[in-house]
Image (spheres, rainbow, N blue to C red):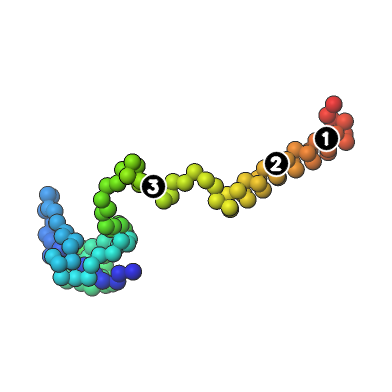
Amino acid sequence: ANSASYAISNNASFEPTGSVVWDTKPEASGTAPLLTETYTLVIHDASKDVTSVPQAGRLRTYDQLRFGMYKPQPYKSLKEGWQCATCSGALSVMDRQALKSVFGMCIITVLSFTWFAGGFGALF
């Protein structure tokens, strides 16, 4: 995983329509390249450390926003041979074993209830 920190904006004042554009190309920022990974956006007061204790009237550190970065791939249609890696309709070995267990328990339950109820003359 990438343990580098990337500064998106420093000393950004609050404005109702304020925005920040982040150029993620490594040559633009001069930092380590971004990996295909999940990242955490940390918002904090630039005059304080990220781990400092919040004070009344000051900006508290916020680190709950997680987002993913990925490298875009060129479009490939189904005619060109694109296949979904996670869209297989086949069942895995574990799925088949689970279904066999469920159906087996259903059959055992029905047969044992029929035998039990038949002993009391409740059936037929």
Image height of 44 relative to 106, above or below: below
| Pointer 1 residue | 117
Please determine whether, in this image, residue 74 is positioned above or below residue 114.
Answer: below
Frontmost residue, 44 versus 87: 87
The span from disc 1 to disc 2 (Cα, nearest Å) is: 16 Å
- Packing grade of label 2 (10 A; few <14, some 14-19, many >=20) is few
Q: Residue at x 83, y 38 (%)?
A: 116
Tell which of 55 and 5 is nearer to you: 5
Say few, some or many: other residues with alpha carbon within 10 Å of mark 1 (under 14 / 14 to 19 / 20 or more). few
Locate the N terminus by quadrant. Answer: bottom left
User: Could you say which disc has been placed on residue 83 in the image?
Assistant: 3
The mark closer to the camera, 2 or 3, is: 3
Please tell me whether mark 1 or mark 2 is closer to you in this view. 2
**Left or right relative to 41: residue 26:** left
Determine the image quadrant of residue 79.
top left
Secondary structure at badge 3 equals loop
What x and y, as percent, mark residue 76?
A: 30, 46
**Percent position of residue 74, x then y:** 25, 50
Identity, as a three-letter code, of the amino acid under mark 1: Ala
* Alpha carbon separation for disc pair 3 and 1: 53 Å
Label annotation for residue 59 = none
Q: Are marks 1 and 2 in contact (CB under 8 Å)?
A: no
Residue 64 is situated, as x and y percent measured from the top left of the image, at 32, 59
The quadrant of the picture occupied by the C terminus is top right
Q: Quadrant of residue 5?
A: bottom left
Which sits earlier in the primary sequence, circle 2 or circle 3?
Answer: 3
Which tag is nearer the camera, tag 3 or tag 1? 3
Q: Mark 2 sits on what residue?
A: 106
Where does the image place residue 112, in percent across and percent down from the top left? 79, 41
